[in-house]
Image (cartoon, coloured by chain):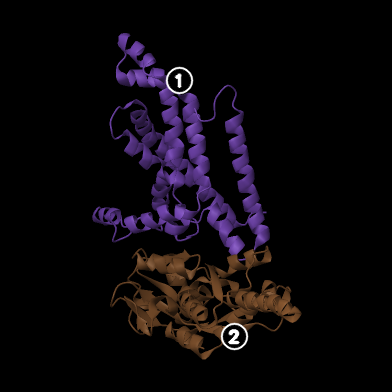
Chain colours: A purple, B brown
Amino acid sequence: MLSEVDLAAVWLTFKLASLTTAILMVVGTPIAWWLARTRSKWKGVIGAVVALPLVLPPTVLGFYLLIALGPHGPVGQLTQSLGWGVLPFTFAGLVVASVFYSLPFVVQPLQQAFEAIGPRPLEVAATLRASPWDAFFTVVLPLAKPGFITAAILGFAHTVGEFGVVLMIGGNIPEKTRVVSVQIYDHVEALEYAEAHVLAGGMLLFSFLVLLALYSRKGTNAWK
Amino acid sequence: MKSRFIALPAGLVLAISSLTAQTAEVQVAVAANFTAPMQKIAAEFAKDTGHKALLSFGATGKLYAQIKNGAPFQVFLAADDKTPARLETEGDTVPGSRFTYAIGTLVLWSAKPGFVDDQGEVLKKSEFKHLAITNPKTAPYGAAAIATLTQFGLLDSLQSKFVTGENVSQTYQFIFTGNAELGFVALSQVMVDGQLTGGSAWIVPADLHDPIRQDAVILANGKDQPAAQALVDYLKSEKAKVIIKSYGYAL
């Protein structure tokens, strides 16, 4: 039912979403922790920057990433001087773009989970002579587990659904940057509606099941 | 006395109908590569006829899908001749209204001055990482680029360097930002008033690929709409042809 090209796109999308989610859990956790605990005047600024992809059209993000990561952009100049070349049209470039694009979907649930825990359990842990790291791993992590699950699911699903940014910096290269959403777009453009339906229907079903799993979890608010 | 009462409403009706005729709007779907010339033509069209053309730009395949699904376009300017012909056989057009409004010119373009020579030899030297083309499955400019590379015997060796834009505007963007060193776009995108807007280019000889015939058609929605007919007539006028040619199209 799926052609070889379609399967390659599905596999690539899976790889991209998995890697992006893994990076976001590592990068997003300290950001969310800082946002949840800080009294800094920068909290508002950082929070707003993290949330930008929620409201910006992907074309804006994609356009600026194309310029910034390109050979004349600041990031492009840096990656070139490090001998890495430039990121657009590469899988690594898609990962970088997806990390930005899905950042709020990971940081916000984590931040809310951390805020819900509050300072009290950590203070108690400190009186029991737990180091801050120890307290984070033995007290905060278990308490915030539902938040981590929500963050991972939303980060993964949102990356799978990414289109505009990938279209603008990907260059539509098979097995490197042609993800499912772009492949669907190609099928529709080429008037191959039957092929488009298989992938688009699959995407719809996948997204629904993910959200169903998320919202059906017992006893937890989906955003915590 | 009586006749004056009748004459007044009759005059009003006449005045209103002529007013609405003057300010009629026509909704036009335009292929992305024809964006710049069409904006200019629409401005002149408004000045000369008083009609207003509302322009929607996009890839031809997407516009086709929108037209098939009830988009309110009255006139369609496609990037190829296949799509309007298909709409015609499917009964979505005003029969007999199809005509060629422009013949596209393919150009190999780089944003860097001096990078592309006037014989296209740069392709054989292969000293670049990315060659931008437009999706050959959907865009005639992409198909023409593939035909040209095939003629040169370079298709296989250069395939791994392809980055593909969904329409010529996106391909242009890849090259303009320097992310692809060079690529095939429409001459209309890099030429204004017969002058290259920047960088370096090789105008691909027309005998290297099938002509990029761009056809227009009045859609079923535009049937008996004076503004739609006026726009089509205007596109065929000498004034419009001068504008179209100044962007590097043949006719």
The total of numbered circles placed on residues is: 2
**Badge 2, how many Cα within 10 Å: few under 14, some, many 20+?**
few
> Going by the image, does B177 lie left or right of A223?
left
Residue under pointer 2: B233
Give me the chain letter of mark 1: A
> Going by the image, does A13 lie left or right of B112?
right
Secondary structure at badge 2 equals helix
Mark 1 and mark 2: Cα distance apart in space:
72 Å
Which residue is painted at 67% across and 82% down in the image?
B97
**Looking at the image, can residue B235 be seen?**
yes
Q: x, y percentage for residue A191?
A: 64, 65
Q: x, y percentage for residue A121?
A: 39, 14
Residue under pointer 1: A143
Q: x, y percentage for residue A72?
A: 28, 61
User: Residue B235's image quarter?
Assistant: bottom right
The nearer-to-camera label among 1 and 2 is 2
Can you say which quadrant of the picture contains the N terminus of chain B?
A: bottom right
Which residue is painted at 72% across and 81% down in the image?
B95
The answer to the question of whether label 1 and label 2 lie on touching residues, with beta carbons closer than 8 A, is: no
Which residue is painted at 36% across and 28% down in the image?
A33
Give me the chain letter of mark 2: B
